[in-house]
């Protein structure tokens, strides 16, 4: 998809703040610094739209990006950032649980992991959480440009086995630097709208 119009409609903390447009939603999750903002920006063709509000230490909100009067990207605050207090962590947990367990418009979660390394314990917990609630998952392994092509299959396998991924869940290699995986990721999203 070639995106022309994107608008940050709301940074929500509570369900009564979620948009009421009724468009399908895709929630983006990943640990802090994994490359989630870069993924969103690449997909929407913007340089820094998703970056500003999602940095650690900023208020933790669900950011609803409306794309072409067609769908929403819901940017979930990154997890696994060491300097977050217990209170903030709990608030994060409540907020995402509320969203993921009640939002009928949610079509799939897009979980971003780093292709270079085995998924972290937090990554595995996130995936288990999504699976527990039967939320369809698309896994994006980003920073593929940092891994030699000859190693891609090996790293893919490591992601699949560490997360204990369902064989039917798609795993897409991506690079925000080169644009690798762009068409494949959009096809996966558009196929679920
Ligand atoms: P976020 O905290 O998950 O939103 O992560 P960012 O999108 O801010 O990215 C964290 C760092 O990784 C930044 O320095 C990015 O430039 C870098 N980065 C993100 N995606 C890629 C990628 O596909 N390839 C490379 N080489 N670097 C990336």
Image (cartoon, grey):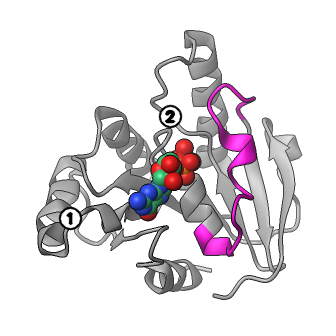
Q: Tell me the magenta residue range.
A: 42-60
The image position of residue 125, as x and y in percent, is 36, 37
User: Residue 60, located in which quarter of the rendered image?
Assistant: top right
Left or right of 11: which side holds 76? left
The correct choice, above or below, for 82 with respect to 95 in the image is above
The correct choice, above or below, for 45 with respect to 102 in the image is below
Residue 52 among magenta residues: yes
Q: Which residue is mark 2?
A: 79
Q: Residue at x 59, y 45 (%)?
A: 101
Label 1 CB less than 8 angstroms from ligand 1: no
Q: CA distance from mark 1 to mark 2?
A: 22 Å
- The reply to whether residue 28 is in sight is no
- SS type, badge 2: loop
Quadrant in the picture for the C terminus: bottom right
Main SS class of the magenta portion in the image: loop
Q: Residue at x 68, y 75 (%)?
A: 45
Q: Residue at x 20, y 64 (%)?
A: 156
The image position of residue 34, as x and y in percent, is 44, 47
- The reply to whether residue 152 is in sight is yes
Q: Which residue is mark 1?
A: 156
Which is more toward the observer, 23 or 181?
181
Quadrant in the picture for the N terminus: bottom right
The image position of residue 146, as x and y in percent, is 30, 61
For label 1, the crowd category at 10 Å Cα-Cα, with few meaning under 14, some 14 to 19 and many 20 or more, is: some
């Amino acid at each position: 998809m070639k995106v022309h119009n994107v608008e940050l409609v709301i940074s929500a903390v509570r369900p009564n703040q979620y948009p009421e447009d009724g468009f399908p939603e895709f929630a983006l999750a990943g640990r802090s610094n994994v490359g989630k903002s870069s993924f969103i920006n690449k997909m929407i063709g913007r340089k820094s739209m998703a970056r500003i509000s999602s940095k650690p230490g900023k208020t933790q909100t669900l950011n609803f990006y409306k794309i072409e009067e067609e769908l929403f990207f819901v940017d979930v605050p990154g997890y696994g950032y060491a300097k977050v207090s217990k209170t903030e962590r709990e608030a994060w947990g409540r907020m995402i649980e509320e969203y993921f367990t009640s939002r009928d418009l949610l079509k799939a979660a897009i979980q971003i992991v780093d292709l270079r390394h085995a998924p972290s314990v937090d990554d595995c917990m996130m995936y288990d959480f999504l699976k527990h609630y039967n939320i369809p998952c698309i896994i994006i392994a980003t920073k593929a440009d940092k891994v030699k092509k000859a190693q891609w299959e090996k790293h893919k396998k490591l992601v699949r086995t560490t997360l204990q991924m369902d064989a039917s869940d798609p795993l897409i290699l991506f690079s925000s630097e080169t644009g690798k995986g762009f068409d494949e990721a959009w096809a996966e999203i558009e196929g679920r709208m």
